[in-house]
């Protein structure tokens, strides 16, 4: 259903506005020609076009529409509130009573963020504060007061380095770009002194010059350098920012568009993966932040002597379809590629999805030909499908604005410009794609999509830093995420503060205590994580699971087909005194949600808080969600319950913390109980997203389980193709392998075709024998990619 403000946050409007403002800054969007600087501007004429273009990214292209008027009115409401509560009396008094003037980074970002909202509203035609000379004087006074007391070239970095080197500079540049024509050259130079100190060399970390910046951080600093240099007329600083994008100083080693051919490591990879913090898959945040900065760099330099070279721009344009679009569903980014941002109230999958849409629109504006058409088609698709949080309909400026910032009007204007051009939305196409260099996959059908949250010795089990993701204990333990067209807000609708974090779908865990040292970015204990792609509709994925203390192990497989996902587990062995469970489903039904649960045609009692034990069911069906086929003789525990939690429970970050407002959501659990200290326990079931009762009854015809042991798990699908995960040398039916491998074998026209990958990413080759015929498949340096050979 469309987002309802009451369901989204249940109050705390201005507090939530601050939360959204304090996520990583980003531009809104536009590509129209920027207005020239006013006569007598302090910005040098030679670099004024860059500043004007950056101003346009804050205040828009002034394209009238009811949607723009509504968004601008919402911005005005918040900007007026911030302006009314702002004190510029000075004398040591705080600008806002809830933001004390103290050393450190906890409050300064908030000050600049609020000032930015006032300034942008002031500088936007039709804004509530637009052109008001009294407001302009207050903005100028506030700039001086914050500079003097909080952020100047003499302060030391206290707390998070990011605040001083990226967060504050961005908000400051947003503000300065709007009011620059009304400042003196001396004032501009004064307020940019700390930016020069902290971002003078975008290649390095200012507080530790031994750290070479990579990925999103490097791109952000590059754009900051370009814009700050333009405000001052410092052409050397502009060039330094442009050169930082491809790391000219470092010989290209940290280029933000380089494609790495290895597992993990910051940046983009040849298979489309994107990693930040060395071991975290991050297309759903830092990758988009990087793309946003790159789009901004293209936009502000377009048509100037500093314009980026076409080959570099072409590489940037190609990133959208390769690294980001596969993980977008209904306009939102999928959970397994959002890292710790799962816990941010102000950055749900839809929020960051809107930011991706804006970045794509900006890139399309500067592109030409088929590139422009393709980028616009993706943006139009996301706008069309994003009905839960409509891009053009901003119910409040605090939520679902285009980009994570408060201001929404430029993004709306730019989207409408694109739609008016007649751009056609891209079609949904069946896709099965494995990203071996970040241990992720995506499975797309015409009706539903799925992805997995896993880990390995290469990729972290979770990221829990800076007070964020405080209950993400098991997000890398084999979570199966399913995305349905009639539940587009499932994970956005207060899922993470209310879901039982010990029973995430697809995981096998015990009910004992969590890791007492939980936190950081720990990688997994085993290398065997990965899978094989057969075609656009079929694939297999394997996960050699061991929990945080080694007291629970399991071999787990997922086989993806057009009808659903077959889930097999074997070798489940526990040594602790805690009971072991595998979660088939833990679905967010919404606030007071309903839905009939059937098991073998009988209605299951759904009294809240009362568990029902389903004795050896053959199938189950949850209304408006889908079906579940039980492929062995296990019993299933069904429980419907209301769970309450606040975003502050999972995010206490200084600049991101959620509200304490309680959220209550209803969940349907389906759980397999393996008991205490199980030995070689197993499970076999299928998840059928969106299936009807009839679909569920007939689904078992679509596959046959061939093996489910600690050595091999395999199925045969319609048409005879075999999908198998081998955790060691072994056989399944007519297929034998010499070592760990994921394998698919079937007919391709008149020939038999073999697809193989090495989930361990450690072997030079694997020998596969099919019906007596052997082939040695070289796998060294493939980093989990599928190799296809004919037999």
Image (cartoon, grey):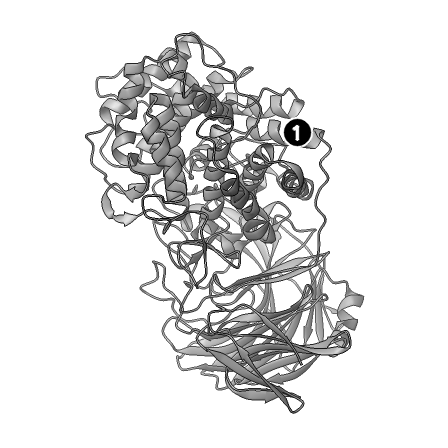
The percent position of residue 559, horizontal first and vertical second, equals 63, 72
Which residue is disc 1 drawn over?
416
Residue 791 placement, left or right of 265: right
Above or below for 24 versus 502? above
Q: Residue furthest bottom?
A: 772
Above or below for 63 versus 510? above
The percent position of residue 525, horizontal first and vertical second, equals 39, 72
Q: Nearer the viewer, residue 460 or 81?
A: 460
Above or below for 8 versus 517? above
Which residue is painted at 44% across and 83% down in the image? 677
Q: Nearer the viewer, residue 705 or 308?
A: 308
Where, by quadrant of the figure, is residue 246 drawn? Answer: top left
Counting labels gives 1
The answer to whether residue 464 of the structure is visible from this angle is yes
The answer to whether residue 100 of the structure is visible from this angle is no
Task: Quarter of the image for the N terminus: give it.
Answer: top right
Residue 782 placement, left or right of 219: right
Above or below for 398 versus 652? above
Q: Nearer the viewer, residue 177 or 46?
A: 46
The percent position of residue 783, horizontal first and vertical second, equals 48, 68
Residue 174 placement, left or right of 426: left
The percent position of residue 208, horizontal first and vertical second, equals 23, 46
Where, by quadrant of the figure, is residue 245 drawn? Answer: top left
Q: Classify mark 1: helix, strand or loop.
A: helix
What crowding class fits label 1: few (fewer than 14 Cα within 10 Å), some (14-19), or many (20 or more)? some
Task: Quarter of the image for the C terminus: give it.
Answer: bottom right
Which residue is painted at 57% across and 52% down in the image? 322
Q: Nearer the viewer, residue 99 or 702?
A: 702
């Amino acid at each position: 259903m469309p987002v309802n403000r009451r369901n989204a946050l249940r109050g705390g409007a201005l507090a939530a506005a601050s939360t959204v403002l304090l996520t990583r800054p980003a531009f809104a969007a536009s590509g129209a020609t920027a207005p020239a600087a006013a006569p007598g501007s302090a910005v040098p004429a030679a670099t004024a076009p860059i500043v004007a273009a950056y101003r346009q990214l804050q205040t828009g292209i002034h394209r009238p529409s009811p949607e723009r008027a509504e968004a601008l009115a919402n911005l005005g409401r918040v900007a007026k509130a911030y302006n009314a509560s702002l004190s510029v009396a000075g004398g040591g008094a705080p600008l806002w009573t809830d933001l004390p003037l103290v050393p450190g980074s906890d409050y300064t970002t908030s000050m600049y963020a609020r000032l930015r909202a006032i300034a942008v509203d002031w500088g936007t035609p039709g804004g509530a504060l637009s052109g008001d000379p009294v407001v302009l004087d207050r903005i100028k006074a506030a700039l001086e007061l914050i500079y003097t007391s909080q952020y100047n070239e003499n302060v030391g970095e206290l707390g998070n380095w990011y605040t001083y080197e990226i967060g504050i500079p961005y908000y400051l540049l947003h503000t300065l770009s709007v009011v620059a024509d009304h400042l003196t050259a001396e004032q501009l130079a004064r307020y940019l002194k700390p930016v020069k100190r902290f971002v003078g060399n975008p290649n390095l970390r200012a507080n530790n010059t031994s750290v070479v910046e990579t990925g999103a951080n490097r791109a952000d600093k590059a754009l900051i350098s370009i814009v700050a240099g333009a405000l001052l007329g410092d052409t050397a600083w502009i060039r330094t920012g442009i050169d930082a994008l491809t790391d000219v100083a470092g010989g290209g080693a940290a280029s933000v568009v380089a494609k790495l051919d290895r597992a993990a490591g910051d940046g983009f990879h040849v298979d489309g993966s994107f990693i930040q913090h060395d071991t975290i898959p991050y297309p759903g945040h830092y990758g988009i932040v990087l793309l946003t900065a790159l789009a901004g760099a293209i936009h502000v330099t377009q048509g100037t002597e500093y314009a980026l070279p076409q080959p570099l721009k072409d590489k940037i344009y190609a990133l959208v379809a390769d690294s980001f679009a596969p993980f977008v569903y209904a306009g939102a980014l999928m959970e397994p590629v959002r890292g710790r941002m799962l816990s941010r109230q102000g950055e749900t999958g839809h929020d960051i999805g809107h930011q991706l849409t804006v970045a794509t629109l900006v890139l399309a504006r500067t592109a030409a030909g088929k590139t422009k058409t393709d980028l616009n088609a993706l943006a139009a698709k996301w706008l069309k499908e994003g009905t839960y949080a409509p891009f053009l309909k901003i119910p409040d400026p605090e939520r679902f604005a285009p980009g994570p910032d408060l201001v929404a009007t430029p993004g709306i204007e730019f989207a409408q410009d694109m739609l008016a051009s007649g751009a056609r939305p891209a079609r949904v196409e069946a896709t099965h794609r494995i990203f071996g260099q970040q241990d992720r996959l995506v499975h797309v059908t015409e009706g539903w999509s799925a992805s997995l949250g896993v880990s390995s010795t290469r990729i972290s089990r979770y990221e829990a830093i800076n007070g964020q993701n405080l209950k993400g204990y098991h997000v890398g333990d084999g979570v199966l995420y399913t995305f349905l067209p009639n539940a587009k807000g499932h994970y956005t609708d207060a899922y993470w503060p209310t879901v039982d974090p010990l029973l995430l779908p697809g995981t096998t865990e015990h009910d004992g205590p969590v890791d007492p040292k939980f936190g950081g970015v720990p990688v997994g204990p085993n290398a065997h994580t990965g899978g094989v792609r057969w075609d656009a509709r079929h694939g297999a994925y394997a996960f050699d699971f061991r929990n945080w203390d080694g007291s629970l192990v399991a071999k787990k497989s997922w086989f993806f087909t057009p009808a659903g996902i077959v889930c097999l587990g074997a070798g489940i062995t526990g040594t602790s005194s805690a009971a072991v469970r595998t979660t088939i489903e833990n679905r967010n039904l919404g606030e007071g949600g309903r839905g009939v649960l059937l098991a073998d045609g009988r209605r299951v009692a759904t009294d809240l808080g009362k568990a029902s034990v389903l004795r050896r069911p053959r199938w189950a069906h949850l209304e408006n969600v889908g079906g579940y086929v039980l492929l062995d003789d296990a019993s299933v525990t069904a429980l419907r319950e209301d769970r309450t939690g606040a975003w502050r429970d999972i995010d206490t970050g200084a600049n991101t913390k959620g509200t304490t407002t309680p959220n209550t959501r209803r969940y349907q659990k389906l759980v397999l109980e393996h008991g205490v200290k199980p030995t070689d326990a197993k499970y076999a079931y299928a998840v059928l997203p969106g299936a009807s009762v009839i679909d569920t009854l007939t689904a078992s015809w679509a596959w046959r389980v061939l093996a489910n042991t600690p050595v091999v798990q395999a199925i045969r699908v319609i048409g005879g193709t075999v999908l198998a995960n081998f955790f060691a040398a072994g056989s399944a039916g007519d297929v034998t392998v010499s070592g760990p491998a994921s394998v698919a074998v079937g007919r391709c026209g008149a020939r038999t075709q073999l697809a193989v990958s090495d989930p361990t990413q450690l072997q030079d080759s694997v020998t596969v024998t099919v019906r007596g015929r052997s082939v040695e498949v070289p796998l060294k340096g493939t980093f989990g990619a599928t190799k296809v050979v004919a037999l």
